[in-house]
Amino acid sequence: MKRIFHPGGSIVTGDELADAVMHYAEALTRRSQVDVVDFPILGEFGTLDRAQILIGAPGGLTCVGAESSYPDLLEADTVDTFRHKALAGTASGRASWTGDGLDSPQFDEFDY
């Protein structure tokens, strides 16, 4: 699971979902665009919930690993949609953010 920090707070979602949101947010930022994304999250008491957040040009997101005793959330169609939207309009069909390096020591320095 991963925690995504956004200007309004933070949410916990599955690894692939978080990576897809970050990938899409980067693509939107490069295009100076925004979008509202909807995806499943782990609610405050372990319930399955949904979040809708604005991503893209105006704000930044931070994504870090999150400890959880619950199974990783996955919604394959949503991940595919975010990845498709991120690649739309790119000349090579590839975006630069891969999610690599999220386990870097620099992220351990912060107390979230």
Image: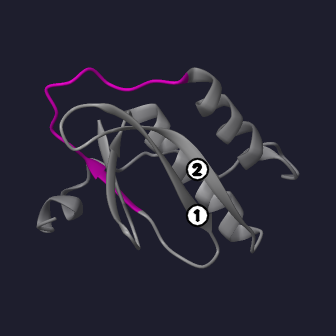
* Residue 66 is covered by the magenta coloring: yes
Mark 1 and mark 2 residues within 8 Å of each other at the beta carbon:
no
For label 1, the residue is 54
- Circle 1 packing at 10 Å, graded few (<14), some (14-19), many (20+), is some
Structural distance between the alpha carbons of marks 1 and 2: 14 Å
Q: Residue at x 88, y 51 (%)?
A: 91
Mark drawn on residue 94: none
Mark drawn on residue 23: 2
Q: Nearer the viewer, mark 1 or mark 2?
A: 1
Query: Is 54 above or below relative to 16?
Result: below
Q: Dot 2 lies on which element?
A: helix
Instruction: Choose between 71 and 32: the one closer to the eye.
Output: 71
Image quadrant assignment for residue 62:
bottom left
Residue 19 in the image, given as x and y percentages of width and height: 48, 43
Q: Residue at x 58, y 50 (%)?
A: 23
Amino acid under disc 2 = His
Side of 105 relative to 47 (left or right): left
For the record, the magenta segment spans 62-75
Q: Does label 1 or label 2 sit earlier along the sequence?
A: 2
Residue 49 in the image, given as x and y percentages of width and height: 39, 36
Quadrant, the N terminus: top left
Q: Residue at x 48, y 72 (%)?
A: 60
Query: Is 45 above or below relative to 103?
Result: above
Q: Residue at x 68, y 58 (%)?
A: 27
Query: Is 52 above or below relative to 66?
Result: below
Instruction: Choose between 84 and 98: the one closer to the eye.
Output: 84
Amino acid under disc 1 = Leu
User: How many dots with numbers?
Assistant: 2
Instruction: Choose between 99 and 59: the one closer to the eye.
Output: 59
